[in-house]
Amino acid sequence: MVIVVASLLPAASPAGADDEFTPTAHQRSTVVGPGYRAEIRRTSYGIPHVLAASLGSAAFGQGWAYAEDRLCDLADQVVKVRGERSRWLGAGPGDQNLASDVGYRALGLVDKARQALPAISRDARSMIEGYAAGYNHYLASVGPGGVRGWCAGQPWIGRISAVDLLAYQQDLAIVSSGRFVLPAVAVAHPPSDQVVWGPHVPAAAVADAVRPLLSGGRNTAALGSNGWAVGGRLSDSGRGELLANPHFPWQGELQLWESQLTVPGVLDVYGAGVGGLPGVQIGFNKRVAWTHTVSPGARFTFDRLQLVPGRPTSFHFGDRILQMQPKVVTVPVKEADGRLKTVTRTLWSGKHGPIVDLSSIDPSFGWTSTSAIEFRDANAGNTRLVDFWLAMARSGSTAQVAARNAEFGTPWLNTLAADSSGTAWFGDAPSTPNLTPKATRAWLESPIGLLDGSDPEQEWREEPGAPAAGLLPASRWPQLTRRDYVFNANNSPWIANPQSPIEGFPAQLGEERTALSARARFNAMLLADPRSAHRFTLDELVSAVLSNETLSSRLLLDPVRQLCRVHAGSTEAGWRDVSKACAVLDGWDGRFQVHSRGAVLWREMLSEVLTAHPDALNAAGPLFSSAFDQRDPVHTPGSPRPDPAVLGPALDSARQTLEAAGFPLDVPLGVVQYSTKGGHELPAPGAPDVLGAINVVEYTAAPATTLEPVVPGGDKLSKDGYQVNTGTSMLLAVRFTGSGPQAKCLLTFSQSIDPASPHFADQQELFAQGKARDCLYAQSEIRADPHLRTTVVTGS
């Protein structure tokens, strides 16, 4: 159909001029067509507030608005889950596109979505269908040639369907599990087969893809968050408060996007989420606010299948012999001359999931004549996501939030919530294998969590009350309700509040009675304020992140200064040439603001210490003289006493690193640390996670699975400084009052990916200044915004 756009807007302001333009009347435009109808009201910083008469129309408006801001990010992911990257872009370096296509076609997410769509709830289906329609109508209104952003002009931009979105929902569910093994799925084949057609992925690339699942306590570590739920005893209003501070990539499909959806009498929710998933995933309504943090527990198991001699696709299961199931996948691949060839592979699955080749990690984990490794994913086929977050958005209390978690579970997230009554709640409800005692022992003993897939006693247990077969039931999830606070910073459920440790939960959810990470410990330290009468204000929640202090600087800066006074200029190892460096640290404010002088030197010094002593902030050693004590996890390890034999050489090495990179020792942090957008370097405050920073900023060479070009960078200081592309992605602070919620927001990388948009980098300026903006939730606030622009969109 043809969509007619009737615009009543004045001529567009130039990029960056949005703050200078105050219209005398609200701007309004109309997109004409039958069917869905939504009113998209964009306020300052380009935040869309979607008003509609039904859930389907609200999602239609959200899909339109998201496409207007970030179409590239979702279009790319739809091509990915369809297994079509090779069709448009060729096999890619190291056959990475081909491996992705083979892996996704082996998982069959599109086929599973096609089967599941008629069976999901009516509300979820209406939102998924409406969102796809909104995205498509926006694309039709501008045409593929009118799409702005990093994918402009790409031939793979096209329409999407509700099936595509449900397939992508399943992909989002396996972010902490199945995504990492796709190359290992794509290259797996029986030892007797000769694979003529690819993918031929280098072994190192397969190992690099899988390795995040096998390290860091089986936590993916690439994603993180801080979350606080403050109860009435510690809030200045006597009601609940919430701090949400997710650490997600600043580019690609996991880049958060902010919006509000209002369906009078049905839904009124504000928050942020990822593209392609209707609704919001972190947010608040009139009575309750919630956030999520990435749970460190396991979302999968590897199962070793004992093969029948001479039959590499047959395996023992107890006293039975079972057959692997073959799946033939065919992938079109664009060649250098533009012609398409087809690559056909046969992939194999065991009883519960695909066969993987992990020989790049350890030869014994490959597919041999005697055994093969099966991957079982707790989130395989998970189509509950839209229903879960819609139910969260409709909740009116922490008790209802807890009930919704029990009903649906989360894919890989903890949940924290606070409500208007002053109750705070924490729950660890992600999809988790329900292991038998025998399986748990095997899982703990194996470096990769490997079970014996031929032993029926190591099957996942099925119990009533689980969101899906084989998962932990809600009755065994750790949870805690308090009137003071609960928190999580990607630590295990053991310490959600130091006064009420949670113990006795299944081992696959995390460890008990072990030292907190430096960041988790600093979160707890800020919450466990020694002033018993202290109550948190909304601004204090914001400053917990944007004050840019770290555990390392709070506890160790003064002791290091004292070492400098005693040792600087001496003939002791490392201390002879550090007098100037010591003077810089003496004048440093101990924070990682863009104007802070000394932050870069501190980071390099502590990095030297932690490279040689990785547990220095978590155990007694060169920084602390007293060990961790489980009776006081917030303040131990304690007794800061830096070892001069370690700190002197570390400080001298840091001095040399800055000088070699061409920076003065007192260089302001913002000169060195920045993100790159539209060819411009934008200063960024914050520090790496390992320093005990709450406002985490870091660099990753692979932000999720996006095709968006990644600016080169790394963790080491060079003449180009520190490139930043992941970390604090959003800050949301909510305070309930007698007249409703008040909230502060910050989307660190801004709302739009269009370099011509005034909202391409406007919030990064706020971030650099350590400021948050008001979230406009009430209808009166939205109508009063001086930059309000309204677009009415309709379509079928």
Image (cartoon, rainbow, N blue to C red):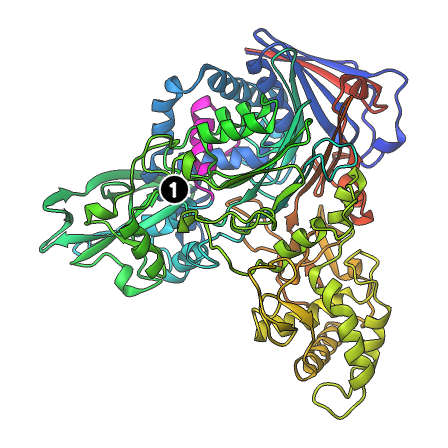
Q: Quadrant of residue 399?
A: top right
Instruction: Tell me: residue 104, above or below residue 284.
Output: below
Classify residue 636 as left or right of residue 76: right
Q: Quadrant of the C terminus?
A: top right
Q: Disc 1 marks which residue?
A: 101
| 238 is within the stretch colored magenta | no
Residue 71: image x %, image y %? 59, 31
Q: How many marks?
A: 1
Residue drawn at 83 percent across, 25 percent down: 787
Residue 622: image x %, image y %? 63, 76
Can you see residue 279?
Answer: yes
Instruction: Tell me: residue 355, above or below residue 515.
Output: above
Residue drawn at 38 percent across, 17 percent down: 118
Q: Secondary structure at mark 1?
A: helix
- Dominant SS of magenta comes to helix
Three-letter code for the amino acid on which mark 1 is drawn: Asp
Q: Quadrant of residue 693?
A: bottom right
In front of the other: 314 or 579:
579
Can you see residue 248?
Answer: no
Residue 171: image x %, image y %? 44, 37
Classify residue 479 as left or right of residue 464: right
In front of the other: 507 or 213:
507
Residue 474: image x %, image y %? 43, 34
Q: Quadrant of residue 72?
A: top right
In front of the other: 550 or 739:
739
Q: Quadrant of the N terminus?
A: top right
Q: Which residues are magenta?
A: 156-175
Residue drawn at 38 percent across, 60 percent down: 202
- Crowd band around label 1 with a 10 angstrom C-alpha radius: few (<14), some (14–19), many (20+): many
